[in-house]
Amino acid sequence: MRQKIFTITSINYLHKAEVLYRSVVATGQICDFTIILCDRKQEITKLPIHFQDVSIIWAEDLFENNDLFHYFAFKFNIIEFNTLLKPIAFETLLQGYDQVIYLDPDIKVFDILEFCISYSIILTPHYITSLNDWTKRPNDLDLLRFGANNLGFICLNKMDESFKFLNWWKNICFDYNYYEPSMGLGVDQKFTDLVPILFDKSLVLKDLGMNLAFWNIHERNVVKKEGQYFVNEKTPLRFIHFSSFPMDDLNQIANKQTIYTDFPNAIYKEIWIDYKKELEASVFYYLKSTPYSYNYFHDGMIINDFLRRNYVDFVKKFPRKKYENPFLTKSNYRKNLRRNYIRLSKTNESHINFKIVDRSYSKADRLFTVLFRVCLFLLGPYKYDLFIKYLNYKTISTRDKHESC
């Protein structure tokens, strides 16, 4: 059986992709490995030397033409575009392999990955035991928002049903691959909740040794026996997904969670510290702060999510402008922004954490609090409720973004 393992990464995650690749090799896995680089083509020092046995594919080479590539690279942000590439890559790679496995770059493999070839699609759930605590994150409600399965892993075997799945998955991603939980959209991952219903030969594999991460540690105790890691004493640890890895604070298991303030046991801490050391030892670690190329127009002006959603509206209004490069400074989309007096900038404040309103926004926060209290007083509770729901409806940026490609 010819097996391919691949990952998708931007340049700033290359050090994680290297650790992933080295971990696969260390297990003795017999497979070919591919890294798909989701960034603008450029020369990267030492890339060919340190990935001699790895196939490197730039994202634009997965598309039939550059116009279509630029359209999707602009339409979707970095998370959305990276995940959009999965079904496209699977279609290409399955032509030459019997089994293709996708792994997120922030994964480390501890054991050989072998999967039954009788199933078309193999998924793994976030967890199989409820936390029963709605006050902590993540919880069951989050699974309803972001998807029951975690698509840091997905395995496809070369079967007719796999290609039917890819055609369905790809096309729904082309239209709806947004990260908008308020709309029930969780990029490519959320859609796979339908896979067990729509595809008879699919499998949700409940192997506790797979996809261990901060969202399922409550049901998985890691121990070490004779140099090998096991989950709950007997299940071999196959791979860990270091999602939201706290590089600057190894006193916690992950950033995007509120369940753990410390490691469950010393073995977990050992594994996390080892992973950090491997990342820091990567020859590509110096690239970790590299800006994502497709966050910028060619003149350096920043592209944020508003501009991406606005671009979809522009293309719907002017379909003939769809297949031109919107990143160009003199593109029709840039001209449209100027006509509408939308000012661009080379500085970005979109990564502010509004969970903690700092001094820069404390005045604005107080002002909005006063304004909403005034609205409540003037409108009363019933009309105020309708007003808030209307604001929510009008400010969802992907509300009317369905279109055929």
Image (tube, rainbow, N blue to C red):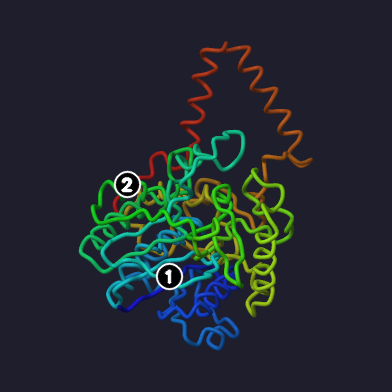
The location of residue 66, given as percent across then percent down, is 38, 70
Quadrant of the image for the N terminus? Answer: bottom left
Could you give the CA–CA distance between mark 1 and mark 2, rounded to whole angstroms?
Answer: 25 Å
The location of residue 106, given as percent across then percent down, is 56, 64
Q: Residue at x 55, y 59 (%)?
A: 233
Q: Residue at x 50, y 57 (%)?
A: 79
Q: Residue at x 55, y 17 (%)?
A: 384
Q: Is residue 114 left or right of residue 52?
A: left
Q: Is residue 162 left or right of residue 9?
A: left
The location of residue 206, given as percent across then percent down, is 41, 53
User: In the rendered image, which residue does mark 2 sit on?
Assistant: 194
- Residue 366, quarter of picture: top right
Q: Residues within 10 Å of mark 1 (few under 14, many from 20)?
A: some
First in residue order: circle 1 vs circle 2: 1
- Amino acid type, residue under disc 2 in the picture: Leu
Helix, strand or loop at label 2? It is helix
Q: Residues within 10 Å of mark 2 (few under 14, many from 20)?
A: few
The location of residue 274, given as percent across then percent down, is 67, 69
- Amino acid type, residue under disc 1 in the picture: Leu
Task: Give yes or no for contact between labels 1 and 2 (Cβ–Cβ under 8 Å).
Answer: no
User: In the rendered image, which residue does mark 1 sit on?
Assistant: 113
